Image (spheres, coloured by chain):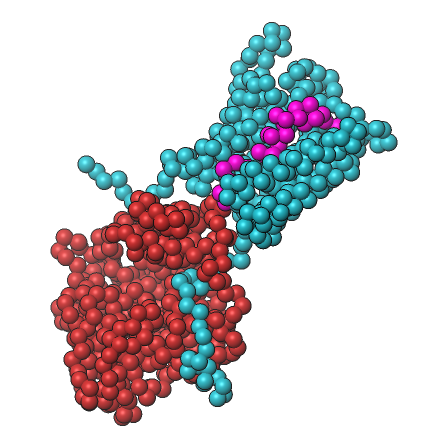
Amino acid sequence: MAAISEKAKGQQRLIVSVSPHIRSEVTVSRIMWTVSASLLPALVMGVYFFGPKALGIVALCVVCSVGFEHLIGNAMGKAGTISDGSAFLTGLLLGMNLPASLWSVNPFMLHVPILGSLFAIVITKLLFGGLGYNIFNPALMGRAFLLVSWPRAMTTWLAPTATFVGLDAKTTATPLGILKEEGVGKLMEIFGTKGNLYLHLLIGDRAGSIGEVSVLALLIGGLFLLYKKYITWHIPVSFLATVGVIVWIFGGKDPATGHLALFTGDPVMHLLSGGLMLGAFFMATDYVTGPQLRSAQVIFGIGCGLITCLIRLLGGFPEGVMFAILLMNCFAPLIDRAVKTKPFGFREVKA
Amino acid sequence: MPTFAGGVHPPDKKELSEGKPITPLKAPGRVVVLLRQHIGAPAKATVSIGDEVRIGTVVGRPEGFVSAPVHASVSGKVIAIGEFPTAMGRPAEAVVIENDGKEQWEELKEAPGFMELSPEQIKEKIKAAGIVGMGGATFPTVVKLSPPKEKPVDVVIVNGAECEPYLTADHRLMLERPGDVVNGLRMIMRSLGVKKGYVGIEDNKPDAIAEMRKAASAYPDVEVISLRVKYPQGAEKMLIKAVTGREVPPRALPMDVGVVVQNVGTTVAVYEAVRFGRPLVERVVTVTGEGIREPKNLMARIGAPVSGLIEACGGFSGEVAKVVAGGPMMGFAISSLEVPVTKGTSGILVLPQEGIFHADDFKPCIRCSRCVDVCPMGLTPGLLSVLAEKGYYEEAKTHNLFDCFECGSCAFVCPSKRPIVQLVRLAKSMVKP
């Protein structure tokens, strides 16, 4: 008791700091690791369809991203940032955005994921000041850099081998690629019915980047993030809705003439294919490179959707999600500034 | 259920002390009565060293309109007048009284017909009793009750939200003295000529809501409103929004939308002042937190040292990191346990080492929008913190810096653990509003 009263008389050193004195349990690292975990279902499906090569690519990207963050980060005087999990997440996303065909020793292609990780972590993030200061989504910048540097390798897609067990991996085109080059008739020829096409797209039994193929698995992860409130509906819903509406209006062609036929597009096919689900739930929702205000996020999502459609329907590439998000990343601060918030009780002063 | 947009749900920790009835704390051997226990001009000492005082003797008289008198809280002799440490950090002038243990009161003027007093008489008694907002803001009550003619007030709200985690002082008062709260509210309504009074209580205190409803049942003009549990539901603007739907504009006062808000403790003090002529010399203080052995709700004399309250609760239960005057969201971490209880001390919170975040251990803003979602004032706290950190104070001002009332919701949710309130205060101190 004597000891207590000694302490109670102010013998102890007390911490003095500004309120609040309690903090929530959510930390940057918890967010990054949770988002990484929510990508696991899609990764598992990718590995199931494309085999161990897929796992090899993703693992290589993760190891390289974390390694570059550690080495270059330390050299730049930003030590100890790998524990926040953001480099891991960047590596994971980059790997999931690459074709499994890159896991190839003859011809040697392993430098592609390694250089992609370098570009994502060092050029896109660390040189701009590290986490929180980068303008562009690092994983997508890494992928964009690879796409323009090794366009052939980056568009060599393995057929989903889970349905061809025992055969050597064949290469094929993605559904969006077939749609762009050969038209909807060819797709129907391959998949038979629309229902069968949708089912393949939903499960992920199709050619594409490792992590983008299984829409079902991506939705599970995305809904989990929504449930955890780590992301909100604003960006994914506005992004997806815009793509759906624009494709429905402008995405159809008259089968006889090949001319544009309004209101005959197939939004379901577009929503389920390419990197749209991965992009809308996991890349466009990146905190650092998107707008901060909810209303600005809706504008951002609509912008992403418009550019995606512009590229898919009129551009040279079959897929446009990556460039759409990167382009909108530039506008994120501007949109934030344009919408501004209305403070509580604020009223327009009447003249 | 009525509430406001934004806000957070910190663990409320009320269970530590909500079941503990208010118990009187033995009058200390010495009290340090600060001359400034309110917003506005400090009181001016009216006693000299060596003077004999009784409980209720005025030791400081108000200087100006926005000010309040302070009274001796023990009987005995004035032994010092000088600067003493305060919870806010800066030392301030105080009158130190040595207790003679005789507990002699000044003669009090009772008013048995207290509900027949005129508004002017009620206000005079409230002013003389030195009553200030006891929720922590310590704005002199009589000033709130004297709105200018062009701002007619039609609603009085008693703030029973007690949205700060841990604190249970108002909860206990509503449970143990519901009739006094209602009578205090009716006196305030009478002084303003207001016909409608509300008591707003957060839904996590169903027993208090029931008691208050029972006590108010005889008065059709008094209504008890159950509010959604969400911090900062008890912030004046948020409470007014939830109860009346009215929004107080930026920089305006509640009276600009016809509302006066009073805290539960203040309302009971008003009742005691008007009915019994009793000055404000003691208050309920919740002594709580994981670092205190036996949490309690104490009726403590104004001027009692915090160390005495801690001892009365069995002392610290282990290594203590912080002692906070007030609640965990907006309270002040104190550097010395010799800091005295003031009219605004709603609680003493003792926090152990675990769970403490150190202010310098923060990361860059990742723009996750959590702060924007929770800000009850509709601001962009993360951006304000970045602007303040980089020294762009003028630009922070254009982002409504001065509308922030520092509730701390943003810093609570920040995953980068940024000291947003600290940075906002820095910016506020560097530019003129």
What are the residue bounds of the magenta stretch?
A132-159
Residue A2 placement, left or right of A216: left
On screen, residue B411 above or below B300: above
Q: Position of residue B197 (x, y in %)?
A: 27, 61
Residue A264 placement, left or right of B324: right
A191 vs B110, nearest the viewer? A191
Q: In which quarter of the view is residue B138 placed?
A: bottom left
Colour of chain B as rendered: red
Q: Residue at x 34, y 47 (%)?
A: B392
On screen, residue B289 above or below A123: below
Q: Residue at x 68, y 14 (%)?
A: A182
Colour of chain A as rendered: cyan
Q: In which quarter of the view is residue B168 placed?
A: bottom left
Q: Residue at x 29, y 92 (%)?
A: B101
Q: Is residue B289 visible?
A: no
On screen, residue A65 above or below B226: above
Q: Position of residue A168 (x, y in %)?
A: 84, 28
Direction front: furthest residue: A75
Residue B305 placement, left or right of A299: left
